Image: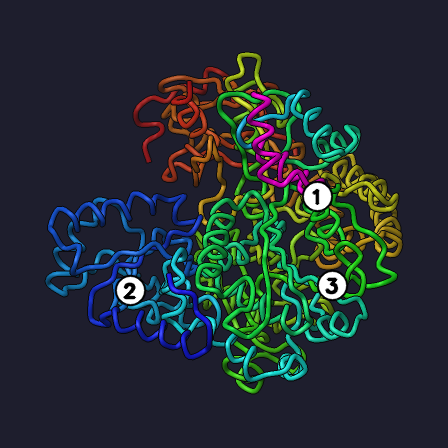
Amino acid sequence: MDINRIDQIIDRHNCEASSLIQVLLEIQSENHWLPKQALERISERLEVPLSRIQHIATFYKAFSLVPKGRHEIHICMGTACHVRGAQNILSAVEDLTGIKPGETDLDLKFSLETVNCLGCCALGPVMDVNGQIHGNLAPADTEEALKKYE
Amino acid sequence: MPRINSPDELEKVRNEILSQKDANKPCISICAGTGCLACGAAEVIAAFKEEINKQGLEADVDTKGTGCPGFCERGPIVVIYPEEICYLQVKPEDAPEIIAQTIKEKKVLERLLYLDPSTNESATRESDIPFYNNQERLIISNNIKIDSKSIEDYLAIGGYSALAKVLFQMTPEQVLEEVGKTNLRGRGGGGFPAALKWEGSRNAPDPEKYVIVNADEGDPGAFMDRALLEGNPHLILEGLMIGAYTIGAREGYIYVRQEYPLAVENVNIAIRHAEEYGLLGNNILGSGFDFTVEVHQGAGAFVCGESSALMTALEGKTGEPRPKYIRSNIRGLWEKPTVLNNVETWANVPLILNNGADWFNSYGTDRSKGTKIFSLVGKINNTGLVEIPMGMALRDIIYKVGGGIPENKKFKAVQTGGPSGGCLPDSMLDLEVSFDELTAAGSMMGSGGMIVMDEDTCMVDVARYFLDFLTDESCGKCVPCREGVKQMLKILTNITKGRGKEGDLELLEELGEVVKDISLCALGQTAPNPFLSTLKYFREEYEAHIEDKRCPALYCKELISYYIDPEKCQACMACLKKCPSDAIIGGKKTIHIIDQDKCTKCNTCLDVCPPRFKAVSKISGEPVPPPIPEEERTITRGNKEK
């Protein structure tokens, strides 16, 4: 990620150490992961030790320290989806993509994550791919749903 | 936008906005909340706009994207004013017909109305639908009436009048007294009286104080805070400002999950608009009161919903709770007195000050006043957000408002309070829902998730599910929560896998008591609740798992097998083709058999077996019958036709 862009984001938050999480979130949302050089730059500019940034980057679920695939699959494991069979959806997607939650495939095509609740409980079980919601799924529907992503 | 400098000017602006609105002009309100957007509301809005443009009706019809009215089951929801016609599950292709028939000809389209399954009668308006008319919608009812991105819409329904009243006609002590009279209790789950919390901060000697909106709604299956913040952000801002005035704070924060992008967007727009009107910033409404507010996004940690963890996260650190020898209203954010309340608690404040404590107290029970919004989800016909007066019976919520359980299945339990709460069985259905009654029954109010479970839900698995969630979300700071919950999960997982042994339940109970008593924060202190409450009401299910290696709900994969009844199988190939692991042996005119070694128990065969055959079933606690000999598997016409 471009160092100037990182600086811009830091400047927008007035270079304040208390904005660390907000800065990391912006970089994560633009770049989809947090490269080491970005963390080093933030550490230098916000005057926060790198160890503390690592602590935060590994504590919060939103951050990733490894590159993500082109398509991010989020399977909702909220209670409402759980009682409507989310576990079977997850197993089906694991079989199809060959990856487990938290992993990215070798072609960097898919990353798989579970989420606690997307708040679309009426549509459960729900899978979100790149922000698009696929609702009322049966395990057999997942193949068709993932087909269109290249 | 003109800056508003006094309450009189506020009324003037309000009157101007109202004078520009023609009450008889048709307005198409489309729910643009997250739930409806997920089922295509954006396309519906675009289709209406396109059709209106095409017909040149821009000046005659308004359209607006509104907040969530709660009936998520039937989204996208469209309400047409002034008649208040409520159309459900509207598709983009319905837009031309609605414009032609309803807007131009004033005819109601029967097919898009709600049809009551019990009486077969259709309901034209929201208030005719049982889902709505069994509720008491004090807070959420405005969501569908206003464009969530427009401050003018909020002003038009009387917005910021409570703020003006407080700033010019009331002292902070009077506000405290009024809110105190209602005994408004925290809607985030704890149920702590808001006025007491405010008073503590107000009396704290430190002059620098903060107010915070807790919108880190992490309970899975709960989304009422999102709907309020997303749909009516000014209401929350107004409540927050009143709180700030009362305790003497000049800065506030809104801590919202980054998983709620629309809420973040809408609340940021609301803050900008309020600043432009002079309703936020310096010298608000010319009163001399200064207040600014900042939005802080959470980065995905359930524990940050806990007040002290949230405050540490706001300071830019890892969100770990701290011991509360001194409460955060005395020493909170940056060690300063801080009042933190949940979104829904703040939303109640302007209502109380506009209508008075007596009005508010006319709703609810003795010890829990007002209403509460629940998200009614899971195995329920009318999934959605429901606002009910405190004290309504669980049975009424589930059957009258929620419309009962789908597919005529049997009700088994309702889970309230999220991962800290518990499950209540059908014998508790007459329980009146309020803070103390729920706690006494072994569950809790929590933020208001209400997950309905039917006969197919395994209660042991539900307990395992919540402990798995909490193991994942424990911050790791204190040992009883970090290690104790993990050990409980290990034992429970063994039970669901058929590896449970005698003594497990006693060990779990003992562990649960320890975790409850000595964990640092509420996450650990309440973590054993899902287990303890399911054990209390569903002990026989645990015993069946441990002693008979049987899952009565036929859910736990390791304890069940799938079986095709050769008497019923018509060799239709449906399951054989769909089975992802090629575990089904058979062919055309050959009865299908499941190869138990290959079967991954994904449930696909049961899903796809035509209901008229119903040949696939689940078996637990007994061996699968051996497959019939190969020579008997052929179906010849006549021997199988029934």
Q: Which mark is residue B120?
A: 2
Which residue is rendered at x = 59% and y = 59% of the image? B292
Which residue is rendered at x = 42% and y = 74% of the image? B10
Residue A69 on image: x %, y %: 53, 21
The span picked out in magenta is A1-28
Q: Quadrant of residue B619?
A: top right
Is there a contact, CB below 8 Å, between mark 2 and mark 1?
no
Q: Which mark is residue A10?
A: none
Badges 1 and 3, same chain: no
Q: Quadrant of the C terminus of chain B?
A: top left
B138 versus B554 height, above or below? below
Q: Chain of mark 1?
A: A
Disc 2 and disc 1: Cα gap in Å? Answer: 58 Å
Q: Secondary structure at mark 1?
A: helix
Amino acid type at circle 3 is Glu
Is there a contact, CB below 8 Å, between mark 1 and mark 3?
no
Badges 2 and 1, same chain: no
Q: Secondary structure at mark 2?
A: loop
Residue beneath disc 3: B208
Q: Please say whether residue A6 is one of the residues in the magenta stretch.
A: yes
Q: Quadrant of residue B171?
A: bottom right
A82 versus A63 height, above or below? below
Say whether residue B118 is left or right of residue B482.
left
- For marks 1 and 3, give the one nearer the viewer: 3
Foreground of the two, B482 or B43: B43
Amino acid type at circle 1 is Ser
Residue beneath disc 1: A18
